[in-house]
Image (tube, grey):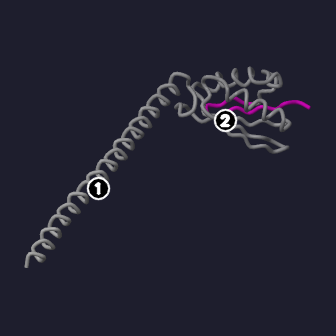
Amino acid sequence: MIMKKVVFILTVFLGCTFAANAQGLLDKIDKALNKVENTSNKVNNASDKADRIGGSIGKLVGKKGAKGASYTVLIEGVKLADLKTISTKLESQKKVGEVKMKYNASGSTLTVLFNGDSEELLEALKDSSPLITDDTVQAIEDDGIALKIGK
């Protein structure tokens, strides 16, 4: 009978010890999950702040994400290398948001997101290449410019 009591007491004691250890383990897991959640929140907050800062810088610089009208620039008689140069130099200008280029030997196209009007875009094109002058202009319209570069 005493042996049964001793075994029962040891079982209860070990059971309580195991329950206490299990609770401690669960507390440790809970703390680790809280740390992960806090870190995730910090990363999300930092990401949101970076997006806001990036948007603010973009507005200041007038680059990607800038609002503006889409203009089509048709260029006839331009070589691919010259078109790439014009596109790259044009895209580096402050009022230009984006330039998409399509090359064709008979006539190439630049689609330009630009903060300004057609005449300002023409001046930006002249700055981007010595091939573009007033003599090469075929048409200036509200939504685009046509150029013909002589051979």
Is 35 situated left or right of 133 in this image? left
Say few, some or many: other residues with alpha carbon within 10 Å of mark 1 (under 14 / 14 to 19 / 20 or more).
few
Note whether 122 is above or below 64 in the view shown. above
| Residue 64 quadrant | top right
Residue 134 position in % (x across, y down): 78, 21
Residue 115 position in % (x across, y down): 57, 26
Under mark 1, the amino acid is: Leu
User: Residue 150 or 23: which is nearer the viewer?
Assistant: 23
Residue at which label 2 appears: 99
Give the residue at x 83% y 25%: 131
Query: Principal SS element in the magenta part?
Result: strand
Q: From the image, which quarter does the C terminus lie in?
A: top right
Mark 2 vs mark 1: which is more N-terminal?
1
In the rendered image, residue 145 lying in the magenta stretch gets the answer: yes
Distance of label 2 from label 1 (alpha carbons): 58 Å
| Residue 148 quadrant | top right
